[in-house]
Image (tube, rainbow, N blue to C red):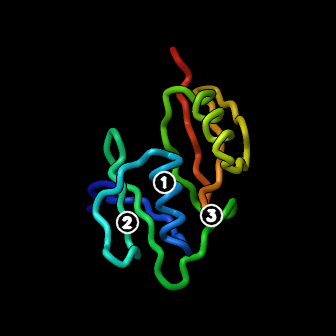
Amino acid sequence: MLNKVAFTMYPAKDATRARAFYENTLGLSRGSHSKDGVWTEYDLPGGGCFALFAGPGAEPAGTKGASIALEVDDLDAVIKKLESDGVRFAQEMIHSPVCRMSVIFDSAGNTIVLHELEKR
C-alpha cells in the first residue's frame, strides 16, 4: 500500500530567507521549485527529498511539532560552523546509546535534528 516517504516538508513564512538558510547555511542544493517561491525541493545526499512550503498559513511547528533528522559525519565540526553562522540551538548535545544529536532552529523556527551515529 505505502511505498516510501516521498518528501518531508516544512512551512516557511519567508521563502527567500528559508532558502538562504537551507542553501547557504546548511549547504543543500535547490532542486525542483515553483517560480513564485511557494514550493522548493532539496534532494538529499543518500536519498530522500526535503521541501519548503511558503504558502498561506505556513506556520512553523517549533519545538512542539515533528522534526527532520539529518545525518552528519562530524557533529562537532557542524556545531562549530553553525555556531559561527549564528544559528540558534534548541539543544546543543544529546547522547543516546547509538548516536549523538543536536537540535537547531531553521530561519522560520522549525527544528532540525543533526544526527551522528556512534563510530563502531
Check if mark 1's residue and mark 2's residue have beta carbons within 8 Å: yes
Q: Residues within 10 Å of mark 3 (few under 14, many from 20)?
A: few
x, y percent for residue 79: 64, 35
Q: Amino acid at mark 2?
A: Thr
Q: Secondary structure at mark 2?
A: strand
Q: Dot 1 corresponds to which residue?
A: 22
Q: Dot 2 corresponds to which residue?
A: 40
Q: Residues within 10 Å of mark 1 (few under 14, many from 20)?
A: some
From the image, state whether disc 2 or disc 3 is nearer to you.
Answer: 2
- Quadrant (top left/top right/bottom left/bottom right) for the N terminus: bottom left
x, y percent for residue 101: 63, 36
- Residue 95 numbered tag: none
Q: How many dots with numbers?
A: 3
Residue 26 versus residue 93 in the image, above or below:
below
Measuring 45% from the left and 45% from the top, which residue is drawn there? 27
Q: Quadrant of residue 58?
A: bottom right
Q: Secondary structure at mark 1?
A: helix
Quick check: 28 left or right of 87? left
Sequence-wise, which precedes: disc 2 or disc 3?
A: 2
Q: Dot 3 corresponds to which residue?
A: 65
Residue 73 versus residue 18 in the image, above or below:
above
Measuring 64% from the left and 54% from the top, which residue is drawn there? 105
Q: Amino acid at mark 1?
A: Tyr
Instruction: State how far apart marks 1 and 3 are (Cα).
Output: 19 Å
From the image, state whether disc 1 or disc 3 is nearer to you.
Answer: 1
Sequence-wise, which precedes: disc 1 or disc 2?
A: 1
